[in-house]
Image: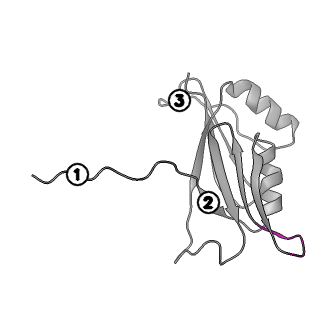
Amino acid sequence: MPETPQPNIRFLIPMAHVSDVKRSLDFYAKLGFEPVSIGKHDDGHHYWAHAKSGKAHMMFASDPESVKVEKEATIVLYMYAEDIVKLRGDLLAKGLPISEISKPFYMPKGEVCLTDPDGYIILIGQAD
């Protein structure tokens, strides 16, 4: 029986196609993300960015050349928090509309939902 090749994928960073990279950076900064690298045109327009918060990474692109997709792609971003109650309070204080804490079977400590400026759904749960 032939050996199954080992996967070469070592890290995943979601890249969301957004209408305004700067606006997305500002929104995700409220979730604790800080820019790692930003691509700007000569006029200062942000067309691409990589941001991170701890081990969580995201990329954003607004230039059609940066993201080539055949059809509209939808993603749901799932993030983990250390203290869901505190995080929800912090985000409410920052003016972000966020759901009440629910406790689905897979996330008994709690989960909240919010939507980013481009309509991407963000679920945040507390695992333990």
The image quadrant of residue 56 is top right
Q: Amino acid at mark 3?
A: Met
Q: Nearer the viewer, residue 21 or 98?
A: 21
Question: How many residues crowd around disc 1 within 10 Å: few (fewer than 14), some, or many (20 or more)?
Answer: few
| Residue name at image x 22 percent, y 51 percent | 4
Instruction: Report, in whole angstroms, how far the alpha carbon at label 1 lies from the one at label 3.
Output: 34 Å
Q: Secondary structure at mark 3?
A: loop
Q: Is residue 95 above or below residue 121?
A: above
Image position of 104 (left or right of 49): left
Name of the residue lying farthest toward the right: 43
| Residue name at image x 65 percent, y 72 percent | 66
Q: Which residue is mark 2?
A: 15
CB atoms at circles 2 and 3 under 8 Å apart?
no
Give the prevailing secondary structure in the magenta stretch.
Answer: loop
Picture coordinates of residue 94, whole percent (x, y): 87, 39
Q: Which residue is mark 3?
A: 107
Q: Is residue 93 above or below residue 58?
A: above
Q: Is residue 28 above or below residue 17?
A: above
Picture coordinates of residue 44, whole percent (x, y): 89, 70
Q: Amino acid at mark 1?
A: Thr
Q: Secondary structure at mark 1?
A: loop
The image quadrant of residue 48 is bottom right
Look at the image and tell me in which quarter the C terminus lies: top right
Q: Nearer the viewer, residue 67 or 105?
A: 67
Instruction: Report, in whole angstroms, how far the alpha carbon at label 2 lies from the one at label 3.
Output: 25 Å
Q: Nearer the viewer, residue 128 or 10?
A: 10
Q: Nearer the viewer, residue 20 or 90?
A: 20
Q: Which residue is mark 1?
A: 4
